[in-house]
Amino acid sequence: MSGAESDVSTVRLSFQHFSWIDYSIFVIMLGVCGGIGIYFGFIKKQTSTKDYLMGGRNMKLVPICFSLVASFISGISLLGIPTEIYLYGSSYIFTMIGAFMMCIIITTTFIPVLHELQLTSAYEYLELRYDKRTRVFGSIIFSVYLIAWLPIVIYVPALAFNQVTGVNIHIVSPIVCLVCIFYTCVGGLKAVVWTDVIQTVVMIGAMILVIIKGTVIVGGVDEVFSKNWATNRLEFPSCNLDLTERHSLWSVTIGSTFYWIGNVAVNQSMMQRFLALSNVKMSKRAVWGFFLGVILIVSICSYSGFLAYARFNECDPLNSKLVLAKDQLLPLLVMDVLAEWKGMPGIFVAGVFSAALSSLSTGLNSMAAVVLEDFWKPFFHKLSQKQTQILVRSVVVILGCICVGLVFVVEKLGSVLQLTMSLSSASMGPLAGIFLMGLFLPFIDGVGALSGGIAGLITAWWVAAQSQLAQARGFLTFDEKERYTFNCTYSFEPMTIVEDITEGEVSYIYRLSYLWFTGLGCSVTIIVASFVSLRSTKNKIDPRLFAPFLRSWLTHKYEVEQMDLKSNPS
């Protein structure tokens, strides 16, 4: 590090140098995104709501794959995964097993059923399978999840920007969000998808630059892995059956399968893109394209976590207070590694913001679809083409502004990656349960599904909230890997060691690994719904609403009743 025995605050300031070239690159990226919005909004106009929300259902496969990856991998993942690897080791990488299992499940059940029904909102399925109340319940869960998640998506890159420039978070957040709201509002899904393509390229390019230059500085790939091996950061998840273990073999396989189903299969933001393709075969290919893209980005982010440890193994920036938040670790590495190359920090910040913009734009676009299809059409009078366009665009603008306001709230919250995963897992678990019952359990009726969903939601939210509260108070801590400060070239105040508070003070269920939250909500939903539905005398079903491989068995056991699935004139 720079400066012999200079103070840590001086060293921290020395990293905050962002040249006019860096600012220019960042502004160009925002300008290109705005330009794409103008192109699809004013030059290649979206003539119908179907075009605006679904890209006319004839989107191309490759851009959709890029878009799926970009919107799922937010700035939270780009900054959170390296921090996760740095603090806790490589076990997180094995959650990709759950992603693989999710892809098998979604391609054999969700995609064929929802594509055949030609839906705009995935939650329309819930009305067809159960009733209107369950559909509204599903849409509300998604809406709450999205409004809780999007401000965090904006806050994380603003934090990175603050680390490398010193610019106030509350100045940069509104500016970037306004650009995003603009191109999402005027350009619709096509603008969202094509900006996602550019943003994915920038995002991956920025991360690759960091790891190549960083690896050279550290002394090669061997050196990176040997330093991590020495502190047990390279490890397999343990086979311990304890559900409170953060990353055991069971939580990264079974637990994360539920987590991925909750965040992809029942998430309108993701399903909207799968359904925007012209046929089932292409949608299935998009699922596997998405999987490969996620593996690529998780691998790059994980390696950058190993690289950060190899670079800072003799002087940990967290214990020495060189960084003030855990998620500023990667920005510090970037400024340390790329600072001498003018423009490179700008590309990195553009990459992290790209990840955030793609998640935000997708969220706003999918929320517009949910408001129109699930909250307006079932309850209010039919709108003209022009009125519909005004409604969906208004949703984008209003929700975007709400998210900017909520960034102030997020700033007061704790560890970013786990907070988001806990929130989203708790919300999407019951929803995953309702969809899975719909596809696999014909005896479950609307009352059962709604009762189970409410019970599952209350349980999952309560456990997640208590877990987060225990962590915030310091009652619940996780064992971190060793970190050292024996060779720092600057002075800092040593961290005060707080005595561990015994875990006995926190109930077992609140100590569950965050990867089990979705499974918990899903399981409670299915168990309660099954009990409530025992009173059901349902004997008529529409086979199209169930998983394809069950249909022949169902037609023998139940009376077939083909529902009139009138396509919405949107």
Image: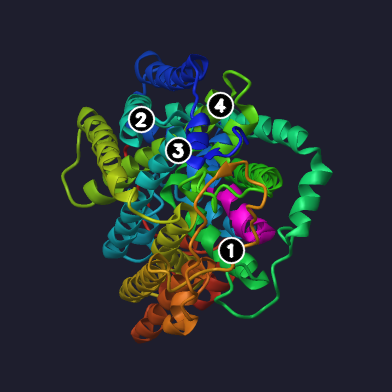
Q: Which amino acid does label 2 sit on?
A: Val
Q: Mark 1 points at which residue?
A: 257
The first of marks 4 and 2 along the sequence is: 2
Indicate which disc, 4 or 3, sits on the residue closer to the N terminus.
3
Q: What residue type is labelled 1?
A: Thr
**Crowd class of label 4 (few under 14; some 14 to 19; many from 20; radius 10 Å):** many
For label 1, count other residues whose C-alpha is less than 10 Å away and answer few (under 14), some (14-19) or many (20+). Answer: many
x then y, percent, for residue 5: 58, 39
**Lower sequence index among marks 3 and 2:** 3
Q: Which of marks 1 and 3 is nearer the N terminus?
A: 3
The residue identified by callout 2 is: 172
Residue designated by label 3 = 157
Q: Which of marks 1 and 2 is nearer the N terminus?
A: 2
Give coordinates of residue 479: x percent, y percent.
Answer: 59, 68
| Residue 1 image point, x, y percent | 63, 36
- The local secondary structure at tag 2 comes to helix
Give the residue at mark 4: 345
Q: In this view, does 282 lie to the left or right of 412?
A: right
Q: Which amino acid does label 4 sit on?
A: Pro
Magenta stretch: dominant secondary structure? helix
Give x and y (percent) for residue 370.
Answer: 32, 47
